[in-house]
Every structure is written in structure tokens, then in C-alpha cells.
Image (cartoon, grey):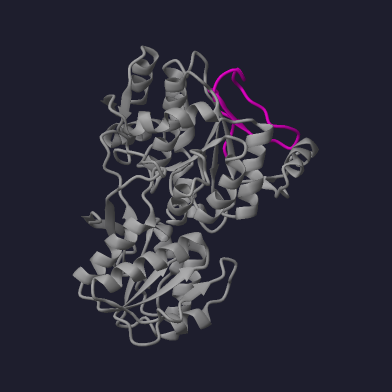
């Protein structure tokens, strides 16, 4: 994947909006059905600009690349599907894809480009909560509807309640208040009474930490390092100090709220210190990818360091999941990765809301999003069927691939969680499901 730098015109547009634009990478070639990519000279599109234009702001590089690359294919797949069945409001949909590099500065720059230069109406993104925090600050004043398939920090719920987002924010993955509850219940069920935490020092990590501590204590558990939380810098490359601190105090288990690249370094450091022996490793969605056990590596005995680790991740169990999996197999081969169904649903909600509003603007999408996602219309899981009903003046209730995606007033959904573990062969497998209660 070659890195590209945006043009002078793009830089001027970005600076005018008050953001420094970082170089961004786009590994996806233009689609013949309405996709577009950035280029060194300009942003180009391949469909009529009168039609709906949406963007994606997802990490194909950086700390979350291993998961971002699994979900990034969902949005062009959705656009291709929609355009094949007539598009939105009589025109084909155009997609502009941007790599946010798992970096808030790059995310803000990418969102500025999408909003001010490409003039998209809605964006699927971002994944990292810290990047979405930066992006939504650009989306809201520009009236661009931002729907994240994976930013799970509880901070967004709090800000939405205060009216900060003015209806231009939603997500198709549930907030970590629910995942923290599910993981705390799992820890109690496993008999862990004393747990330590180590988290990446950003909105995702700190928000999850707070929710887990509150919930685990209410369930009768003790958080060993509550008064001295271990939070690591996202740009850290060495973790000896953090490893020592996180495993101090003889915990039954250590909860790591991590990203894959830096998380693998932390877990290696802990193993090399010998502090992981006899301590259960608990993990979350930020590292759940098939490559993560290999990133962490094997010990001197030839066994995977992560063997026996358990974690949670928002699950996918919506009415549209089977058809989504079949389409993915047909068009791409194999199975979709983590958060791919959530990304599909985010894009689906953008196009369906635009059709419901008969308006290709962010304001139009925002005005109809909750009606399409959680209204009293005809339940529908096929996006083309939904568009057909909307074009006929009917109301729909979209039931997605990831779940029912009943978006509430704060832009939140409630989901179920898969419990996963790492086997002795380094393979990740789902062993259970938990629903926060």
C-alpha cells in the first residue's frame, strides 16, 4: 500500500477549516460503481455528483489496522449493492474512502477533506474512539452524518445527552458501558475476585476502565490497582514499567483494554518478566483479530503466550447476517471479519435515511435516521428491499447484519457479546455469548 500526499488544493481546504492535514493512505482502487479515492492531484469521482455522496473514515494503517482492514471492504460492497438495484433518489451513490491511520490528527484531517472538499453527506467512521472524537468535531458544524461501526467509548453517550452532536452522530456498535458490564459478569462467573486493569490512555481505554471498575465493584469484586490505574501512552514502544505495575498485588486476572500493535508489545513484556504465570488474561474487542496471537508470539516452550486468554467483542446476530455473509463469500471469498457487519449496517443506514428523506444531505439523513433504524415501519433486512419500500412511500424498520440497530436518541444501540478465547494452536474461537443485564 503506497502512501500518497494530498494536493495543494486539498491542503488549502483543510487549513481553511483549521486543521493540519496529514498524509493519508488509501489502498482501495476506484470502483466501477461509484467509489472514488484520493489522488496526488485531486479527488475524483466516477458517478453523477447530483447523487448521494458518502465517505468512509477507517483505519487501514496504524495501531488498529489489523481490525480496520477486516471492516473496510463492507462499505464499497454496500455501495455496489445499492447501485446495482437503482441507487438512492434516482442516482448512483458515490463513495470516497480515507484511511484515518488510527490517529486523531489524521482522522480530523480526513474528515475535513470529506466534509469541505468532497462535500459528503454522511461518513462511516471511525473505529477508534479517539479518532471519532476528532472527526465528529468536524462533522457536526459541517452537518455531515457520522455513523461509527466501532467507536464504543461511553463519552459519546454523555456528549449526545448534552446535545453536543445535534443529531449528527450515531454508532452501530454498543457503548462500552454494556461491554464492561458483560465482561465484569464474565469475570465474576469465572470466579475472579481480584482484577487489575491496564488500558490504552485514550477515550476507549479510560472509558472502558471506568465502566468496568464501577460494575465489577458492584458485583462484589476488587480492582487491585483502582487507586493507581495503569494507562499507557498510545505512542509507547516499551512497556516494562506498565507490565510490572499491572500485575502487581497478586490479581486473579488482568484486564487489558488495548490496541493490537501496542497491546502485543505490552503482553510480550509481561511474559518476559514472568509475571503472567498463573494470572488470567482478559481482553476486549480492540485486539480481537486472527493475527493478534501471532503478534504477541510464542514463549520459550513453543506455546502461544496468549493461549487461554479470554475476551469479549460485540457480536453480530442480526436478521440480515446470513445474507451478508453469503454476499461477502460470493463477492470477496472467505468470511467477513470483526466489525464488518457493523460497517455494512452503518453504510446501509446512511443510504436508507437519505432515501427516506428524499434528500441527499447530512441534515436529511439525520432527520430520518432513527425512523429508519428504530421506527414502526415494515421490518426489513435487505437494503434493496428497504429502498424499494421507501421509494414507494412506505416506512421501514431496518434490521441489520450486526443486530436490530435500533438507534436511540443518543445514537446508541444495545448488542450482545461474543466470548472468545485463544487456543493452544493460536486460533481464536468464540465459546459463548453474553448479554448485559
Magenta-colored segment: predominant secondary structure: loop
> Residue 289 falls in which quadrant of the image?
bottom left
Residue 42 rendering spot, x and y as whole percentages: 73, 32
Image position of 338 with respect to 246: above or below: above
Q: Is residue 295 left or right of residue 309?
A: right
Question: Image point 29% across, 24% down: which residue?
Answer: 377
> Residue 16 falls in which quadrant of the image?
top right
The stretch in magenta equals: 27-52
Residue 84 rendering spot, x and y as whole percentages: 44, 18
Residue 251 rendering spot, x and y as whole percentages: 32, 82
Q: Is residue 420 left or right of residue 237?
A: left
Nearest the camera: 230 or 23? 230
The C terminus lies in which quarter of the figure? bottom left
Question: Image point 45% across, 54% down: which residue?
Answer: 158
Q: Is residue 39 left or right of residue 102?
A: right
Q: Is residue 211 left or right of residue 111?
A: left
Question: Image point 36% across, 29% down: which residue?
Answer: 371
> Residue 192 falls in which quadrant of the image?
bottom left
Image position of 52 with respect to 305: above or below: above
Task: Judge whether residue 270 is colored magenta.
Answer: no
The reply to whether residue 26 is in sight is no
Looking at this view, name the residue that lies furthest to the front.
162
Image position of 412 with respect to 345: above or below: below
Amino acid at each position: 500500500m503506497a502512501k500518497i500526499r494530498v494536493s495543494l488544493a486539498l491542503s488549502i481546504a483543510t487549513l481553511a477549516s483549521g486543521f493540519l492535514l496529514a498524509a493519508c493512505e488509501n489502498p482501495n482502487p476506484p470502483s466501477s460503481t461509484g467509489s472514488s479515492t484520493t489522488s496526488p492531484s485531486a479527488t475524483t469521482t466516477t458517478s453523477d455528483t447530483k447523487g448521494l455522496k458518502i465517505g468512509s473514515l477507517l483505519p487501514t494503517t496504524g495501531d488498529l489496522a489489523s481490525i480496520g482492514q477486516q471492516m473496510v471492504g463492507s462499505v464499497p460492497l454496500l455501495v455496489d449493492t445499492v447501485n446495482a438495484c437503482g441507487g438512492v433518489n434516482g442516482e448512483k451513490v458515490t463513495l470516497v474512502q480515507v484511511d484515518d491511520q488510527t490517529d486523531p490528527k489524521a482522522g480530523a484531517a480526513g474528515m475535513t477533506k470529506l466534509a469541505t472538499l468532497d462535500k459528503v453527506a454522511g461518513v462511516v467512521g471511525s473505529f477508534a474512539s479517539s479518532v471519532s472524537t476528532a472527526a465528529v468535531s468536524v462533522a457536526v458544524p459541517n452537518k455531515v452524518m457520522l455513523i461509527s461501526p466501532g467507536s464504543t467509548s461511553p463519552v459519546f453517550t454523555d456528549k449526545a445527552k448534552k446535545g453536543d452532536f445535534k443529531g449528527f452522530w450515531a454508532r452501530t456498535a454498543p457503548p462500552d458501558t454494556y461491554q464492561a458490564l458483560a465482561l465484569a459478569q464474565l469475570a465474576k462467573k469465572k470466579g475472579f475476585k481480584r482484577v487489575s486493569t491496564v488500558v490504552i490512555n485514550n477515550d476507549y481505554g479510560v472509558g472502558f476502565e471506568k465502566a468496568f471498575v464501577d460494575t465489577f465493584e458492584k458485583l462484589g469484586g476488587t480492582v487491585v490497582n483502582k487507586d493507581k490505574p495503569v494507562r499507557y501512552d498510545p505512542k509507547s514502544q516499551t512497556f516494562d514499567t506498565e507490565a510490572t505495575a499491572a500485575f502487581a498485588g497478586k490479581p486473579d486476572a488482568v484486564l487489558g483494554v488495548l490496541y493490537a500493535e501496542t497491546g502485543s508489545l505490552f503482553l510480550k513484556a509481561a511474559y518476559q518478566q514472568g509475571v503472567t504465570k498463573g494470572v488470567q488474561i482478559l481482553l476486549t474487542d480492540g485486539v480481537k483479530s486472527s493475527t493478534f496471537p501471532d503478534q504477541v508470539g510464542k514463549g520459550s516452550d513453543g506455546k502461544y503466550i496468549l493461549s487461554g486468554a479470554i475476551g469479549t467483542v460485540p457480536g453480530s446476530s442480526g436478521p440480515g447476517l446470513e445474507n451478508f455473509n453469503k454476499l461477502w463469500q460470493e463477492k470477496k471469498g472467505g468470511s467477513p471479519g470483526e466489525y464488518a457487519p457493523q460497517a455494512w449496517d452503518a453504510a446501509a443506514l446512511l443510504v436508507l435515511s437519505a432515501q427516506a428523506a428524499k434528500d441527499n444531505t447530512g441534515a436529511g439523513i439525520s432527520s430520518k435516521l432513527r425512523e429508519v433504524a428504530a421506527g414502526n415501519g415494515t421490518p426489513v433486512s435487505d437494503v434493496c428491499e428497504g429502498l424499494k419500500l421507501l421509494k414507494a412511500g412506505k416506512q421501514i424498520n431496518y434490521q441489520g447484519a450486526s443486530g436490530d440497530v435500533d438507534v436511540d436518541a443518543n445514537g446508541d444501540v444495545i448488542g450482545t457479546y461474543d466470548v472468545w478465547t485463544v487456543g493452544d494452536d493460536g486460533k481464536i474461537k468464540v465459546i459463548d455469548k453474553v448479554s448485559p443485564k
